[in-house]
Image (cartoon, rainbow, N blue to C red):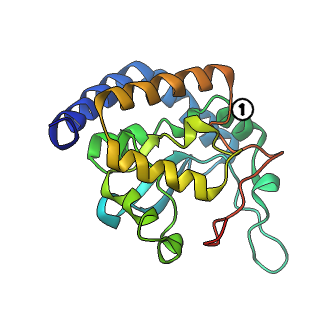
Amino acid sequence: MYKSTFKRLLDIFVSLVALMVLSPVILITFLLLKYAKRGNAFFLQERPGYKEQPFYIIKFKTMSDDRDENGNLLPDVQRTTSIGKKIRALSIDELPQLINVLKGDMSLVGPRPLLFKYIPLYSATQRTRHNVRPGITGLAQVSGRNSISWTKKFELDAYYAQQVSFMLDVKILWLTVLKVIKKEGINQSAERPMQPFDGTN
């Protein structure tokens, strides 16, 4: 009952309340980025969602579009703006995803939505991460996001997809709040960026 009905109702209620409460923060961040970048303050990218259906994830844009002489984007560390670093440190860049939650693209808790290019690299078990809606936070994120391997992350994602429950979601949300307050492992750091998944790591 929770997985099929109550979880979605909880997502709608919490995302609505959060958007109303955090609207000043979202508006100020939007204006700051709009002024600093003189362009789009949002980053939209197509990701696989529930049952691998495509959707566009919404985040605040914390990186520039600077490219090298060959037209290739510079490494993330070089493109992250000064204001972007501050926004990431406070996890504010994730707040627009509350809109994704309200729309039904995402849930508050679930496996993080990655890239379509990874799907052919998944094992059958790893692919079960798409049996639930992707989340703003998840079991892998509160278990040491950048300090654990992709393999371990996907083990945790598959476990979550199999064991979804109200108490597990409450636990993950509580641990997420604690990690945001302590600034622990929620956002990828410049000092220890996560390497792309290649099917073996």
State whether residue 166 is above or below residue 201.
above
- x then y, percent, for residue 179: 61, 26
State whether residue 193 is above or below residue 84.
below
- x then y, percent, for residue 23: 43, 25
Give the position of the N terminus as an image quadrant: top left
Question: What secondary structure is found at the residue carrying circle 1?
Answer: helix
State whether residue 6 is above or below residue 105.
above
Residue at image position (50%, 48%) is 156
- Within-10-Å neighbours for mark 1: few <14, some 14–19, many 20+: few
Residue at image position (73%, 38%) is 85
Residue indicated by mark 1: 86
Give the position of the C terminus as an image quadrant: bottom right
Of the residues shown, which amino acid type is indicated by label 1? Lys
In the image: residue 34, left or right of residue 105: right
In the image: residue 93, left or right of residue 184: left
- x then y, percent, for residue 14: 31, 26
Work out whether residue 71 can be spotted.
yes
Work out whether residue 53 can be spotted.
no
- x then y, percent, for residue 134: 39, 50
In the image: residue 138, left or right of residue 104: right
Taking depth in this image into account, of 31 and 79 the one nearest to the observer is 79
The image quarter in which residue 74 lies: bottom right
In the image: residue 5, left or right of residue 185: left
Taking depth in this image into account, of 147 and 195 the one nearest to the observer is 147
Residue at image position (75%, 43%) is 189
